[in-house]
Amino acid sequence: MTAGILNVNKPRGMASFAVVSLVRRLTGVRRVGHAGTLDPIADGVLPVCLGAATRIVEYLVSAPKVYRAVVRLGASTDTYDSEGQVTATGDASSVTLEGLRAALGEFEGEIQQLPPMYSALKYEGQPLYRYARQGKTAPRQERTVSIYRLELLSFEPPLVELEMEVGRGAYVRTLAYDLGERLGCHGHLEGLTRLRSGPFLVQDAIAPDQLEEAVNRGDWEDLLYAPDRVLESWHAAILAEEHSRDICQGRLVQLAVRSEEAFRLPLEAPCRAYSDEGEFLAILRHRGGGRWQPEKVFAGPQISPDSA
């Protein structure tokens, strides 16, 4: 059964859910999900997981992402982007290159962000954007997010072009808004392109019409990446036949360390497991005393890509 990941280049103006619906309709695969929402104004990398690969989504969502963003100074909006209603205006003509660079330096590293009201975060079971659309404000808490890299590409007032690498939960829209507030002139996100999500790059991504052409040719599955592509930076264990069988049946296994140099398993992190023939079997977690338990199993008769 079909299982894998499509690296889709989502076009601007198309919702992430619409991409998922399109993939489901074109391929006929029932279980489909994306790994990290892109707002309609954004384009770029949208990994779409099919079949058993949907069980990888949580790891892909946690992976670092790279964006190119255009911020327009001089006005803030209720959505923090160009699709919202203007809530405040200011004079951006006094912003200097030196002042902009100094302000950007305050947004690198671990910073505090207040999630925008127009977001899918929930309060009392309802997404925040539903409150916002009713003109209401729900309680929100600042949270720590990581901005690993923030580079100024160009400054042609009132437009600021940035490239950034961010961790999970960081809102580029909020960064644009906060930058405008820090500069004292207000600001909002004018455009956004996701250049990378985990191992997936925009230059390798396929447009929706390219996927449709591949479906019509009958070779669209050649575009799929294996589910474990997302986990390539993790340690790996190669298991003998007996251990492979136990893992596929959900049992704990005792893994002996062959040598410190040749076989080191990180006890604090998950590990990917393979059969001695190279088949991706499972994600393992250490349970103490050299015992490893399958957290998610991807091989074996009990796992179906469309039902797992």
Image: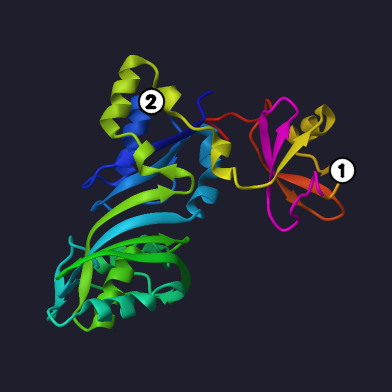
**Which one is closest to the eye, mark 1 or mark 2?**
1
- In this picture, which residue range is highlighted in magenta? 261-283
Q: Position of residue 19 (x, y in %)?
A: 32, 39
User: At 33% across and 64% down in the image, what residue appears?
Assistant: 172
Q: Which residue is mark 2?
A: 27
Q: Is 175 one of the magenta-colored residues?
A: no
The C terminus, quarter of image: top right
Q: Main secondary structure of the magenta part?
A: loop
Disc 1 from disc 2: Cα separation: 44 Å
- Residue in the foreground of this view, choosing between 84 and 44: 44
Can residue 44 be seen in the rendering of this structure?
Answer: yes
| Dot 2 alpha-carbon crowd within 10 angstroms: few under 14, some 14 to 19, many 20 or more | some
Q: Is residue 62 above or below residue 200?
A: below
Q: Is residue 180 above or below residue 161?
A: below
Q: Which residue is mark 1?
A: 258
Identify the element where label 1 is drawn: loop
Q: Is residue 125 left or right of residue 273?
A: left
Identify the amino acid type marked 1.
Arg
User: At 55% across and 50% down in the image, what residue appears?
Assistant: 59
User: At 36% across and 49% down in the image, what residue appears?
Assistant: 195
Q: Is residue 208 above or below residue 122?
A: above
